[in-house]
Image (spheres, grey):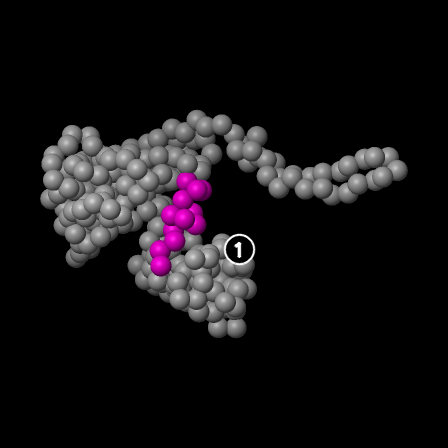
């Protein structure tokens, strides 16, 4: 397994009637480029003269799109958590209007947020099946947590690394997602359920106030050194929060 977010350049996103075109340059001749929409792998392409293009129907300009270069033969493998999971640092937790078992394997839940200070949440940051394994309970082992297991459990959301894909051992009513790192501010969010026919439920949500430590400066590098004066000149990218 090998993947990288570097080497994908000249990313351009343009709108068309009904969706988006995403174009980019892939500098890795031995890799294909995956396209993730709101955390879900939707397509992958082999570069033609270093160019890739994705046509995403029914997608808005505010939907979260990420590109990842992976080894040949791994285009259909989902690496979102491994590649981008470490960039997420703010948790959104909400209660579903009913226990999880009544939802069907074809139902999805979508999560949106807005920018700090906005009144509405219109940036789609996550979308996934209620039961990513395609069934209501996954049993033990790797798939344990891909659906409700057997008992009603008030406010039960499970635990462990893999349990963001569903919920642990009880029928539960909590969903949880960790967003990308965000600067301090008050952010609106909402979540809704959509069925296989595209019918959407009423949105549930609210606002979250983030009051975090400032992000550190980045990219400390040596610019020059003068042996005669023993002077060392360095540079860095300042924190976005200071």
Measured along the vertical axis of the image, is residue 17 above or below residue 210?
Answer: below
Residue 237, horizontal then vertical, whole percent: 62, 39
Residue 132, horizontal then vertical, whole percent: 24, 51
In-image side of 13 versus 171 (left or right): right
In-image side of 144 versus 23 (left or right): left
Query: Does the magenta portion include 80?
Result: yes
Instruction: Find the residue positioned furthest to the front.
Output: 141
Front one among 209 and 85 = 85
Which residue is depicted at the point 83% across and 40% down? 226
Query: Which of the 4 image quarters holds residue 160?
Result: top left
Which residue is depicted at the point 46% across and 57% down? 2
Main SS class of the magenta portion in the image: helix
Viewer can see residue 153: yes
Quarter of the figure that contains the N terminus:
bottom left
Quarter of the figure that contains the C terminus:
top right
Residue 170, horizontal then vertical, whole percent: 16, 36
Q: Tell me the magenta residue range.
A: 77-88
Measured along the vertical axis of the image, is residue 226 above or below residue 14?
Answer: above
Which residue is depicted at the point 39% across and 63% down? 75
Measured along the vertical axis of the image, is residue 150 above or below residue 9?
Answer: above
Residue carrying label 1: 6
Front one among 104 and 157 = 157
Front one among 139 and 152 = 139
In-image side of 129 versus 225 (left or right): left
Query: Does the magenta portion include 60?
Result: no
Measured along the vertical axis of the image, is residue 26 above or below residue 64?
Answer: below
């Amino acid at each position: 397994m090998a993947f990288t977010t570097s080497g994908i350049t000249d990313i351009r996103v343009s709108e068309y009637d009904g969706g988006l075109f995403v174009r980019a340059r892939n500098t890795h001749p031995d890799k294909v480029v995956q396209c993730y929409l709101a955390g879900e792998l939707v397509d992958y392409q082999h570069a033609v003269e270093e160019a890739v293009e994705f046509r995403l129907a029914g997608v808005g300009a505010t939907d979260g799109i990420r590109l990842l270069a992976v080894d040949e033969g791994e285009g259909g493998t989902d690496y979102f958590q491994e590649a981008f999971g470490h960039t997420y640092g703010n948790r959104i937790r909400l209660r579903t209007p009913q226990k999880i078992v009544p939802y069907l394997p074809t139902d999805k839940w979508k999560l949106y947020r807005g920018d700090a200070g906005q009144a509405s949440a219109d940036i789609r940051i996550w979308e996934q099946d209620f039961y990513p394994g395609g069934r209501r309970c996954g049993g033990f082992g790797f798939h344990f947590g891909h659906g409700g297991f057997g008992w009603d459990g008030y406010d039960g959301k499970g635990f462990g690394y893999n349990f963001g894909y569903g919920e642990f051992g009880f029928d539960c009513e909590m969903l949880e997602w960790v967003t990308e790192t965000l600067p301090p501010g008050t952010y609106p969010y909402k979540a809704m359920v959509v069925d296989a026919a595209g019918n959407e439920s009423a949105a549930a949500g609210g606002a979250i106030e983030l009051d975090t430590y400032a992000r550190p400066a980045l990219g400390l590098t040596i610019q020059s050194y003068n042996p005669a004066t023993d002077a060392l000149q360095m540079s860095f990218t300042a924190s976005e929060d200071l």
